[in-house]
Amino acid sequence: MTRRRVLVAGLILLGALHLWWGLWAAVAPRHFFDTFPGFGHHWTAAYPPYNAHLVSDLAATFTTLGVLLLIAAWLRDRRVTAVVLVGVLLFSTLHLVYHLGHPGGLRGADLAASLISLAIGVLGPAALLVVARRA
């Protein structure tokens, strides 16, 4: 698989994931809060109380990032891709830093899984930026 294809596939994967989270939070904010990330885990609910405004803002953020990532995949422009990935990387890094210092009600395996997924959220866009520079 060429670097360009890896880049486009990565942008589509990240875009779809962010769009899924954003639309889920927008359409069913309370359900998102209570059950994210799903599969019997409740990471967002570990930061009570429920706040509809905060979940709405998160929905807007995830949806926006998802759409931008998909646009970057579609346009296949190096500068657009770099700008979008830097934005996602900045958001993801700030998100990870917050959760490193504030575990909320998460403990044990759920805390570890949450932090690992947030770290992957930083490493993914960073790796795609490297691929984009070489593609």
Image: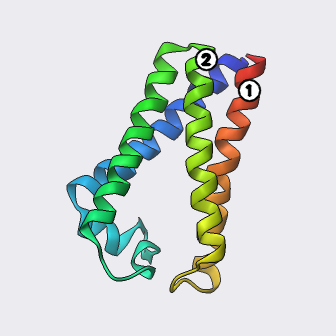
Is 92 left, or right, of 119 in this rendering? left
Percent position of residue 42, x then y: 43, 76
**Vertical order, 119 against 8 (above or below):** below
Residue at image coords 36%, 43%: 63
Give the structural element (helix, strand or loop) at label 1: helix
Residue at image location 52% in from the left, 40% down from the top: 14
Q: Quadrant of the C terminus?
A: top right
Q: Mark 2 points at which residue?
A: 79
Quadrant of image for the N terminus: top right
Which residue lies at the image location 55% right of the left edge and 49% below the top edge? 91
3D distance between C-alphas at marks 1 and 2? 13 Å
Q: Quadrant of residue 116?
A: bottom right
- Image position, residue 115 (x, y; %): 64, 68
Name the amino acid type tagged 1.
Answer: Val
User: Which of the numbered marks, if any, corresponds to residue 131?
Assistant: 1
Q: Position of residue 9 (x, y in %)?
A: 57, 28
Q: Which of marks 1 and 2 is in front?
A: 2
Q: Is mark 2 on a helix, strand or loop?
A: helix
| Image side of residue 134 versus residue 40, left or right | right
Mark found first going from the N terminus, 1 or 2: 2
